[in-house]
Image (cartoon, rainbow, N blue to C red):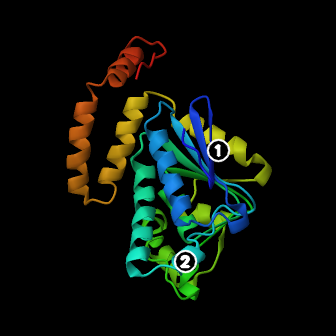
Amino acid sequence: MAEYEHILVKREEDTITITMNRASRRNSLSDQHLAELLVAFLEAGDSDATGVVLAGAGPVFSAGHDFADVSSRDLMGVRELLQLCTELMATMQSVPQVVIARVHGLATAAGCQLVASCDLAVAAESAGFALPGGKGGWFCHTPAVPVARAVGRKRLMELALTGDVIDAATALDWGMVNRVVPDAELDTAVADLLARATRGSRASKALGKQTLYAQLDRPEKDAYAVALEVMAAASQLPGAREGMAAFLEKRQPEWTD
């Protein structure tokens, strides 16, 4: 794997953990930090791992964009930075692995965007979530895109317009995260959810994830058109054949893909 300055990458069995490692800067997302995250996710996507955990070192998950970087850029420079960030978010959703956020402390602005862009998220009770641009001078336009799709319109408006922090329990109620656990149980809860989300055929799971995102925001008729064709084609995959055969033969399946 590549050498990194701002992140740590570790593989244990079938899981790759990518840890933002700019604790002194509250894991804020500079151009270099975003670029390293993008490379790490692309490398993970090309691997045979089945799951990726996104975590943050230090007391904060991520404080969002690094204002020291942003303030030094002209319009074209800020646009390039936001395009890089958007590419990272899209890559997290396009890699074949299940991507799960391990959230502790604050996840604000683009940090909240990271959580919303992951397939799954588990938060410690100490976690908090915010789109603080609403009470500042730079509104959280791009972070609001995946957050809206997670929490819905009215809750997005409250987050984006007030800029206030919501606690982990509220984030769970609003659909931002899948689980909230005591801080001491965070790693165990992440591992448990990831293990359940990665069982079965890897190829089937990858196609399933890709198709879910492809149909998610389409009108229902269009969503069915996408899902129907993919599901028909997927019936011919080795994993689908093996899964059906194992069910009919009353035995445990043996996944080869």
Residue 55: x and y in percent read 64, 52
Give whichever of 161, 180 is nearer the camera. 161
Q: Considering the numbered disc 2 on the image, is that residue within a helix, a strand or a loop?
A: helix
The residue pinned by badge 2 equals 159
Q: Taking 120 as reference, is 188 left or right?
A: right
Image quarter (top left, top right, bottom left or bottom right) of the N terminus: top right
Disc 1 versus disc 2: distance between alpha carbons? 25 Å
Residue 57: x and y in percent read 71, 55
Q: Considering the numbered disc 1 on the image, is that residue within a helix, a strand or a loop?
A: helix
| Residues under numbered marks 1 and 2 in contact, where contact means CB atoms less than 8 Å apart | no
Instruction: Answer yes or no: is residue 179 visible.
Output: no
- Name the residue located 40 percent from the left edge and 58 percent from the top edge: 87
Instruction: Answer yes or no: is residue 12 visible.
Output: yes
Which numbered dot is residue 190?
A: 1
Residue 38: x and y in percent read 47, 52
Tell me if mark 2 has few (under 14), some (14-19) or many (20+) residues whose alpha carbon lies within 10 angstroms of its own. many
Give whichever of 240, 68 is nearer the camera. 68
- Name the residue located 63 percent from the left edge and 64 percent from the top edge: 62
- Name the residue located 44 percent from the left edge and 58 percent from the top edge: 89
Earlier sequence position, callout 1 versus callout 2:
2
Which numbered dot is residue 256?
A: none
Task: Inspect the image, locate mark 1, and give the three-letter code of the amino acid beneath it.
Answer: Val
Tell me if mark 1 has few (under 14), some (14-19) or many (20+) residues whose alpha carbon lies within 10 angstroms of its own. many
Q: Taking 231 as reference, is 184 left or right?
A: right
Task: Inspect the image, locate mark 2, and give the three-letter code of the amino acid beneath it.
Answer: Leu
In the rendered image, the vertical position of residue 114 relative to residue 120, given as above or below: below
